[in-house]
Amino acid sequence: MATPPADPIRPDPLGADPIHKAASRAGRYRWAIVALLFMATVINYVDRQMIGVLKPTLSEDLGWTETDFANVIFFFQLAYAIGYIGFGRIVDVIGARFGYAIAFVIWQVAHIAHGGAYSVTQFAMARFGLGIGEAGNFPAGIKAVTEWFPAKERAFAIGVFNAGANVGAIITPLVVPMLTVAYGWRMAFVVTGVVSFIWLGFWLVMYRRPREHKRVSTGELAWIEQDPADPVQPIAWKKLVTVRETWAYALGKFFIDPIWWFFLFWLPGYLGTRYDLDLLSFGPPLVAIYLLSDVGSIAGGWFSSRLMARGRSVNYARKMTMLVCAFAVTPVFFAQSIDNLWLAVLVIGVATAAHQAFSANLYTLPSDLFPRAAVGSVVGIGGTVGAIGGMLMAKYAGYVLDSIGSYVPLFVVAGSAYFLALLAVHLLSPRLARVEVAQE
């Protein structure tokens, strides 16, 4: 008869660190959960970015001005602001499994509805529905990571699934133009929406909380639960909004989220106008930019986790990584003046990579600072504030491009935002000390 495995959390008689012994025997099912989150984020960003890739086609077909396009984006951001705070609360109350599923169904139905839109108003309505549903992606995803990973692995896990944003941004300019040329832009929305429902089946079958999952070994469960126990009951918003650390995260999102939206929605049009590219030819430059972004997303989480593994505090690791990223964005100030396409791609790609690395660390702050019962709500509050910033950026971009036709003011804002975000985080949470918030 085989000898049963030793208890992974019992102190080793030879003095070995029981946590490291647990890690060595722990399973890897939690990384299957990250793979699901990664794929959902890929789908999320394909659906989200299609309007940016199709902007020249839609503007020509439907007669849009820059302000029309900005207004469509504005209503997406408005819905995102509403949906983010709503789904932040929903996933804290009903959990990540069903909260994510509800969000996914809403955004896929709205995505498919784009194929039947004929006016700016109808497009804005479809984008509003998309914004409501897509807003659930990150609150549910971060909630899932909080349930499935100890604090020391969360930044890396979030960086991995957040890299799906860049993969989605890579796939979109490669696949969508071909679908559009072959079947038209309306069918492109329908086909991508219908195929994406495959993911929902895998999610509902595979996702449970770790203690409820038959595929999780004793060793892996011990590894996941190594941090001190948290309260499990939801915490009231009225208590969370009085805590400075909530606003440290929220203001960080307010400053950086609009920059990512700018890159996502306006970059295809910028490359087309500045370098005379069309629907099919701007694909490779966009792919290169978002490949760099993918590297940044994973590297940002890895770098701060590496600093922590070397004995640095959470405060030092997160903020030092974000400071490096803020400096890496600054060359984008000069993007408009670069005549060589591929040099511009490098400068913009480094900026988007730095954004993703900064974002991966910012996304970990709710789980660093708050008990698990509050993570979804804090993420929701931050996402809403970030979406409000995105609404302002959309209006500003439309006004600047229609009035002066130059991207220079937009790149100046992009190059400055990360220092402001880090300053807000540091002033409101100088030590990133864990918050004790009373339950409802």
Image (spheres, rainbow, N blue to C red):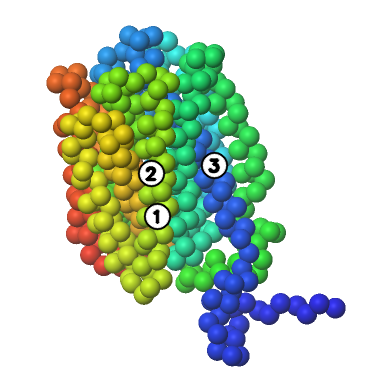
Q: Residue type at mark 1? A: Ala
Residue 5 x %, y % = 71, 77
Sequence-first tag of 1 and 2: 2
Is residue 435 left or right of 421 when viewed as pictured? Answer: right
Where residue 100 appears, as percent x and y from the top left, is 53, 42
User: Helix, strand, or loop for circle 2?
Assistant: helix
| Residue drawn 56% across the image and 80% down it | 18
Mark nearer the viewer, 3 or 2 = 2
Query: Residue at position x 22%, y 60% from top?
Result: 426
For badge 3, the amino acid type reads Met
Q: Which residue is mark 3?
A: 39
Q: Are marks 1 and 3 in contact (CB under 8 Å)?
A: no
Q: CA distance from mark 1 to mark 2?
A: 10 Å
Categorize mark 2 by other alpha carbons within 10 Å: few (<14), some (14-19), many (20+).
many
Dot 1: element: helix
Q: Which mark is residue 292?
A: 2
Q: Mark 1 or mark 3: name the one nearer the start of the chain.
A: 3
Quadrant assignment, res 284: top left
Between 11 and 109, the residue placed more toward the observer is 11
Provide the residue designation for mark 1.
299
For disc 1, the neighbor class at 10 Å (few under 14, some 14 to 19, many from 20) is many
CA gap between label 1 and label 3 equals 19 Å
Q: Is residue 424 left or right of residue 380?
A: left
Q: Which mark is residue 347?
A: none
User: Quarter of the image containing the N terminus?
Assistant: bottom right
Q: Quadrant of the C terminus?
A: bottom left
In terms of sequence position, does the residue under pointer 3 or pointer 2 come before the other? Answer: 3
- Asked if residue 248 is positioned above or below residue 135 in the image, the reply reads below
382 and 420: which is toward the camera: 420
